[in-house]
Image (cartoon, grey):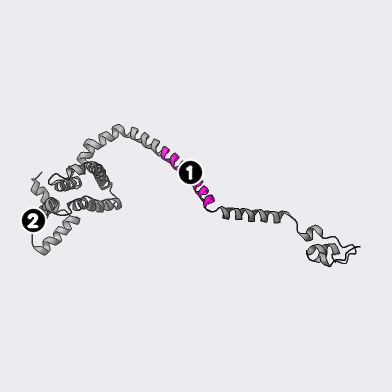
Amino acid sequence: MGSLPQRFEEFLNRPGLLGDFLSNLEAKSGVKRYYLATGSIAFLGLYLMFGYGASLLCNLIGFVYPAYVSIKAIESSSKEDDTMWLTYWVVYGLFSVAEFFSDTFLYWFPFYYAGKCVFLLWCMAPVSWNGSQVLYYSFIRPWFLKHHQTVDSVLSDLSGRALNVASAASREGLGAADQLWKWLFPRELSRQASSFGASCTRASVPSADESTALPDPVGRGRSSPISAAAASPFSLKRLPRRE
């Protein structure tokens, strides 16, 4: 195992996104990639200490590159890179939750974002001793193996209660919507009910032709005077009056 500068230089010479970028930059500028990398790291550290928007820059460092390599890990056939970046995201999520409650106090510490950036870079470093592997196998995994059954039972109970609450809320919402509709549009509802009742009455009462038409006693195919008179409400006036 070489010294830290040698391992750092070997890391910079590895093929990949960073190695290809430094190779192109080295060919165009004539400066060795080792000095390019160390100068960039020094500038980034100074900017995180004194520059504007250090929080945004630090979050981008901890999210953009890991998201990119996570997509590549999903598309690859190997499982090792999937496990590596899933471990990183577990640690990153727990760190984000802890930071949410402590950021108000840690914000006032000098060089906080520089330290946070170093921590995230350590967690995503492509080495076996990176921060995500160390934290996961030292703290997160033992706690999970000890308490995961309790957590599963609590989550199952909460999901059942949430389903019951959602069902009750949907029923209450439908009932409230129905009452609101009746209160806002009472005339519309009464008109619809009246038209529906009238249509039912017309469908159940036989027509005038069916109820009053009598068979032709002569058999000539003509209706009797009673059926002709009943066919029209005005034809009764033309009938002769009996004395």
Residue nearer the viewer, 166 or 225: 225
Compare marks 2 and 1 and give the one earlier in the sequence: 2
Quarter of the rendering occupied by the N terminus: top left
Residue 172, labelled with which disc?
1
Tell me where residue 222 sits by quadrant. bottom right
Say whether residue 210 is visible.
yes
Query: Distance between the Cα atoms at labels 2 and 1?
Result: 68 Å
Tell me where residue 198 sits by quadrant. bottom right
Q: Residue at x 57, y 54 (%)?
A: 187
On whether residue 171 falls in the magenta region, the answer is: yes
Residue nearer the viewer, 235 or 37: 235
On whether residue 211 falls in the magenta region, the answer is: no
Please, what is the three-letter code of the amino acid marked with disc 2?
A: Tyr
Residue 4 spot, x, y in % from top left: 9, 46
Please, what is the three-letter code of the amino acid marked with disc 1?
A: Glu
Q: Classify 10 Å Cα crowding around label 2: few (below 14), some (14-19), many (20 and above).
A: few
Q: Is residue 158 above or below residue 189?
A: above
Label 1, secondary structure: give it. helix
Q: Nearer the viewer, mark 2 or mark 1?
A: 1
Q: Main secondary structure of the magenta part?
A: helix
Label 2, secondary structure: give it. helix
Residue 63 spot, x, y in % from top left: 23, 51
Farthest front residue in view: 243
Residue nearer the viewer, 81 or 60: 60
Q: Classify 10 Å Cα crowding around label 1: few (below 14), some (14-19), many (20 and above).
A: few
- Chain part drawn in magenta: 160-185
Tag 2 residue? 35
Q: Residue at x 60, y 53 (%)?
A: 190
Q: Are discs 2 and 1 less than 8 Å apart at CB?
A: no
Quarter of the rendering occupied by the C terminus: bottom right
Say whether residue 224 is visible.
no
Tell me where residue 24 sits by quadrant. bottom left
